[in-house]
Image (tube, helix red, strand yellow):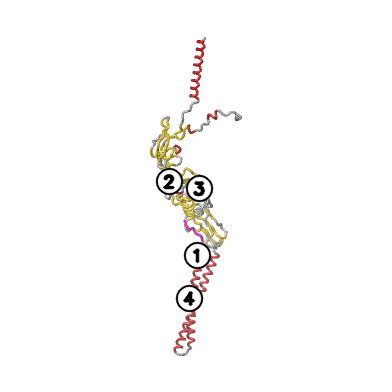
């Protein structure tokens, strides 16, 4: 009996051990810690550039506001918006009646003064003869000393009056020249070759230019365009004149227009002129407001495809490299000041830490100068970085919260 019980007990122990071993195997197979998987990217050769981005506005390289220097009614406008004109072409005419009358009045004043001068010159000749007679009579004691002195005084007085009339004639001639110039200003000619980009005064309107010239129309040289690029204060210290720049248009993002950065204006862009100004303002921005500075460069525009006030997406190239070995910037684990960085490289199923030396970066890719070869697989993420939420998600807590 005892022997039978002992055999049964041994069988149950063996069965329990088998169950325990099976449980451990199942736990290890199905619930063991999974092997880490990696997200990798290959080191490849590509063109890369380090640049500063800015928004810009297109302006004509040279713009002239053609105004009226005299007042009057705009009689005739000889051009229309968009016309291409040559220097010297007649653009507009102001009614010349007022200026013609002013010229006639000035010419009449000159003639009057010249007549007065002629009359005085005739008197001078008479007084010269009178003086000569008085001198002869005084030599023979036939006339008094007073008559001689009176004749001398009359002669000198008329000579001085002639000198005064000559000065008045010069002044009147200046008035004539001024009147002629004002009459010429009624014919407004093109000051340069260009295109009419705006008309501010229409035919029939009266222009008044007593204090400042009234703008009739605006001309611009559209063969060359200037780009005003708004550079943020965070980037303006990194750029300098002479750097290669290019921009694209909102309607044509595939075509690039190239130029060289000519200048960076020293004053910040005023908030009142940002987006439409042609130059910087001396006013400073208030605290908490972004500060921008205009960077200027020119591009040719022979076909006049570029228009005034177009918006440009500007890129200022600081460094660039052709067919450089590059990896994603997100693969960098630690970056040191001496240009060296740490990455993980996948060798088989094992991620090895490696030190490399990096170059320029466009914030997406970074150049590798040494430490990697083309085709190397760098780790940009692995399963160990994922939050451990799957187990809790598969076994939600019981309803009610359980206090």
> SS of the residue at dot 4?
helix
| Nearer to us in this view, 230 or 24 | 24
**Which label sits on residue 163?**
4
Q: Earlier in the sequence, mark 1 or mark 4?
A: 4
Residue 190 in magenta stretch? yes
Label 3 and label 1: CA atoms lie apart by 42 Å
Q: Depth-wise, is mark 3 or mark 2 nearer the camera? A: 2
SS at circle 1? helix
**Of label 2 and label 4, which has the lower sequence position?**
4
Q: Are marks 1 and 4 in contact (CB under 8 Å)?
A: no
Q: Residues within 10 Å of mark 4 (few under 14, many from 20)?
A: few
Which mark, by number, is residue 181?
1
Q: In 3D space, how far apart are the residues under numbered discs 1 and 4 (Cα atoms)?
A: 27 Å
Query: Does the rendering let one see residue 305?
Result: no
Q: Give coordinates of residue 1: x percent, y percent.
A: 52, 9
Residue depicted at x 51% and y 74%:
113
Task: Point out which mark residue 311 bears.
Answer: 3
Horizontal arrangement in the rendering, residue 359 relative to residue 15 (left or right):
left
Image point 38% across, 37% down: which residue?
371
The reply to whether discs 3 and 1 touch (Cβ–Cβ < 8 Å) is no
C-alpha distance separating marks 2 and 1: 54 Å
Q: Report the residue that reaches farthest toward the top.
A: 1
**Residue density around tag 2, few if under 14, some if 14–19, many if 20 or more, within 10 Å:** some
How packed mark 1 is, by other alpha carbons closer than 10 Å (few <14, some 14-19, many 20 or more), is: some
Q: Position of residue 68 (x, y in %)?
A: 53, 60
Part of the protein shown in magenta: 187-192
Q: What's the mark number on residue 318?
A: 2
Find the distance from the CA under tag 3 to the CA under tag 2: 22 Å
């Amino acid at each position: 009996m005892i022997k039978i019980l002992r055999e049964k007990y041994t069988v149950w122990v063996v069965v329990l051990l088998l169950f325990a071993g099976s449980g451990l195997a199942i736990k290890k197979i199905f619930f063991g810690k999974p092997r880490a998987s990696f997200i990798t990217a290959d080191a490849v050769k590509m063109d890369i550039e380090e640049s500063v981005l800015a928004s810009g506005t297109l302006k004509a390289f040279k713009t002239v506001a053609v105004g009226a220097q005299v007042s009057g009614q705009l009689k005739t406008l000889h051009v229309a918006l968009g016309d291409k004109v040559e220097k010297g072409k007649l653009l507009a005419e102001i009614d010349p009646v007022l200026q013609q009358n002013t010229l006639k009045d000035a010419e009449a004043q000159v003639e009057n003064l010249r007549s007065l001068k002629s009359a005085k010159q005739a008197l001078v000749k008479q007084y010269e003869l009178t003086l000569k007679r008085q001198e002869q009579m005084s030599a023979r004691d036939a006339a008094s000393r007073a008559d001689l002195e009176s004749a001398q005084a009359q002669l000198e007085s008329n000579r001085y009056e002639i000198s005064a009339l000559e000065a008045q004639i010069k002044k009147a001639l200046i008035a004539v020249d001024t009147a002629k110039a004002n009459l010429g200003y009624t014919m407004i000619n093109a000051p340069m070759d260009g295109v009419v980009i705006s008309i501010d005064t229409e035919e029939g309107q009266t222009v008044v230019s007593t204090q400042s010239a009234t703008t009739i129309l605006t001309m611009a040289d559209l063969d060359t365009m200037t780009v005003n690029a708004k550079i943020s204060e965070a980037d303006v210290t990194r750029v300098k004149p002479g750097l290669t720049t290019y921009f694209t248009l909102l309607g044509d993002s595939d075509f690039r227009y190239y130029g060289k950065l000519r200048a960076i204006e020293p004053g910040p862009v005023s908030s009142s002129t940002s987006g439409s100004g042609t130059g910087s303002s001396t006013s400073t921005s208030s605290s908490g407001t972004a500060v921008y500075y205009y960077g200027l460069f020119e591009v040719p525009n022979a076909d006049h495809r570029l228009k005034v006030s177009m918006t440009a997406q500007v890129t200022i190239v600081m460094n660039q490299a052709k067919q450089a070995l590059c990896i994603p910037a997100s693969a960098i684990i630690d970056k040191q000041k001496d240009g060296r960085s740490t990455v993980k490289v996948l060798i088989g199923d094992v991620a090895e830490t490696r030190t490399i030396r990096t170059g320029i970066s466009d914030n997406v890719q970074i150049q590798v100068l040494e430490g990697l070869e083309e085709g190397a697989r760098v780790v940009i993420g692995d399963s160990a970085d994922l939050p451990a939420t799957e187990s809790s998600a598969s076994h939600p807590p019981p309803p009610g919260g359980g206090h």
